[in-house]
Amino acid sequence: MSEVWIQLLGIGLVAGIAGGMFGIGGGAIMVPAMVLLLGMDQKFATGTSVAAQILPIGILAAIVYERSGNLNWRFAIVIAIGLVIGNLFGALFANLPFISAEMMKKMYSVFLLAVGVRYLFFR
C-alpha cells in the first residue's frame, strides 16, 4: 500500500473518531489534513471530503447514539433538510469562477478560528 493511501486511511480514521465523538462530521479534520499533509488544492480537498462523507457519515454513530437513547430523530430530520439545501448552495458558491482555492482556504481558516474562539471563550 502506498504512503498516500496510508495517509488517506489515517485521515479518515481520525476524522471518523472526531465525528463520532464530537459530531463534527470529520470535514474539520479531513480538509486541513488533505491540504497540509497531502498538498491538495483547497477546493479539491473540500470536494473529496464531501464525497467521502456522503454515505458513511454518521450511520454507525447514529445507531450507537440511538441505542444509547441520545438521538432526537425529529431534530435530526429537520437539520438534515437544512443540510441538503445548505450543501447545495455552499457547493454552488464554492465553485463560482471568482472563488479561488486560496480564497476558500482563507474563508475556511476564519470559520475554524471563529468556532474555536467561540468554544474557548463563550457559552
Image: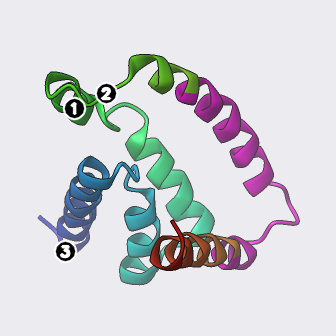
- Residue at the image position 48 percent from the left and 71 percent from the top: 119
Of badges 1 and 3, the one in the foreground is: 1
Image coloring type: rainbow
Disc ID at residue 65? 1
> How far apart, in angstroms, are the residues tagged by discs 1 and 3?
34 Å
> How far apart, in angstroms, are the residues tagged by discs 1 and 2?
6 Å
Q: Position of residue 72 (x, y in %)?
A: 38, 23
Magenta highlight range? 79-106
3 or 56: nearer the eye? 56
Instruction: Tell which circle, 1 or 2, labels the residue nearer the N-terminal end.
Output: 1
Q: Are marks 1 and 3 in contact (CB under 8 Å)?
A: no
Q: Amino acid at mark 2?
A: Leu
SS of the residue under disc 3: helix
Q: Amino acid at mark 1?
A: Tyr
Q: Is residue 64 left or right of residue 94?
A: left
Work out which quarter of the rendered image holds the N terminus and state it.
bottom left
Which image quarter: residue 99?
bottom right
* Residue furthest right as drawn: 98
SS of the residue under disc 1: helix
- Residue at the image position 64 percent from the left and 40 percent from the top: 87
Look at mark 2 in the image and give the residue it sits on: 71
Look at mark 3 in the image and give the residue it sits on: 3
> How far apart, in angstroms, are the residues tagged by discs 3 and 2?
38 Å
Q: Position of residue 5 (x, y in %)?
A: 22, 64
SS of the residue under disc 2: loop
Residue 58 within the magenta-colored segment of the rendering: no
Residue 96 within the magenta-colored segment of the rendering: yes
